[in-house]
Amino acid sequence: MLRVILPVLLLLTVSVHGEDITMPASGSSELDAVALVRAVETQYQGDRSHGKMRMHIKTRSWNRTLELEMWSEGREKLLTRILSPVKERGTCTLKVDDDIWNYISRIDRLIKIPSSLMGDSWMGSHLTNDDLVKENKVDKLYQLSITERAGNEVSITGKPLPDAAVVWGKIVYRIDTASLTPLLVEYYDEEDVKVRSMIFSEFKQIDQRWLPMLSRIVPEDKPGEYTEMQYLEIDFSVELPRDLFSLKSLRNR
């Protein structure tokens, strides 16, 4: 199993949380799995980023399309702002560490999301507030191991660490080790029933890294429904204002 991954990972070093993480040349599959997941996350996110995205939500009852502007810094800070539709323009979500605030521009109201609402839908999509908090902490919340390989494709299974406060009973990643891109993520409940899938496509090379420009989230229990997110532009070399990820900045954007 390790022989397939090592040619890609031997000399690869990535930076997460300001730490240099060197891919291990030997050792357990768990260590290699953690390094690989972190490498993919870092390639996708970078130290800082700014971009624009279109999100289309399809449910049984309605369709909704949003255009969003997004900023991120490391794994802990994320700011999104609605650009359209016009009636929702200026509505923002700010994530800092494990805290999330929503600013609703049309009524000039700032709301901190309580823990009891972390499982609620984010902007009506098939993502939850909890997804925003936990999305880049998989290596801290789950024990990761390489469970399958086929050519350049590797499957990594994550099972919750003891006492980890998580929603999912299991997460399965499929990753292309040649390009360090995610192909598929499957989410299972505690009874090992698949709840939803996230499918990545339309890969594009930006700043010497391959990125999926399109992702689709499909809930297993709601046939025909999905949330689709498409990057319109993204920049990893941007300089961000010091006070960008602050409550004060929400009203000023």
Image (cartoon, grey):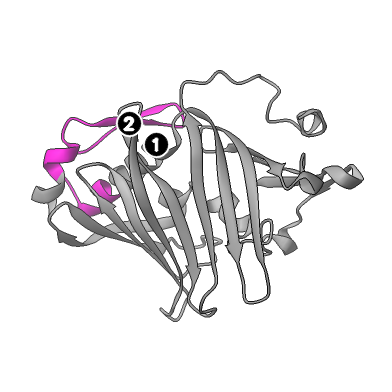
Dot 2 crowding, Cα within 10 Å, few <14, some 14–19, many 20+: many
Q: Quadrant of residue 84?
A: top right
Q: Circle 1: is it few (<14), some (14-19), or many (20+) Cα within 10 Å?
A: some
Residue sitting farthest toward the left? 3
Residue 129, horizontal then vertical, whole percent: 65, 56
| Residue name at image x 71 percent, y 22 percent | 243
Label 2 belongs to which residue?
Answer: 14
Q: Residue furthest right?
A: 107
Residue 150 appears left or right of 197: left
Q: Which residues are magenta?
A: 6-33
Q: Is residue 15 magenta?
A: yes
At label 1, which amino acid type do we have? Thr
Which quarter of the figure is the N terminus placed in? bottom left
Q: Secondary structure at mark 1?
A: helix
The residues tagged by marks 2 and 1 sit, at their Cα atoms, a distance apart of 7 Å
Residue 50 falls inside the magenta stretch: no
The answer to whether 137 appears left or right of 114 in the picture is left
All told, the count of numbered labels is: 2
Relative to 58, say whether 206 is above or below: above
Query: Is residue 199 something one can see in this rendering?
Result: yes
Closer-to-camera residue (77/66): 66
Residue in the foreground of this view, choosing between 21 and 8: 8
Instruction: Say whether residue 25 is visible.
Output: no
Badge 2 amino acid:
Val
Q: Nearer the viewer, residue 48 or 74?
A: 48
Q: Which residue is pictured at 34% across the width and 39% down the height?
A: 204
What residue is at 69 percent from the left and 56 percent from the top? 123
Q: Which mark is residue 42?
A: 1
Q: Could you tell me if the residues under marks 2 and 1 are in contact, i.e. CB atoms within 8 Å?
A: yes
Above or below residue 103? Residue 201 is below
Q: Secondary structure at mark 2?
A: strand
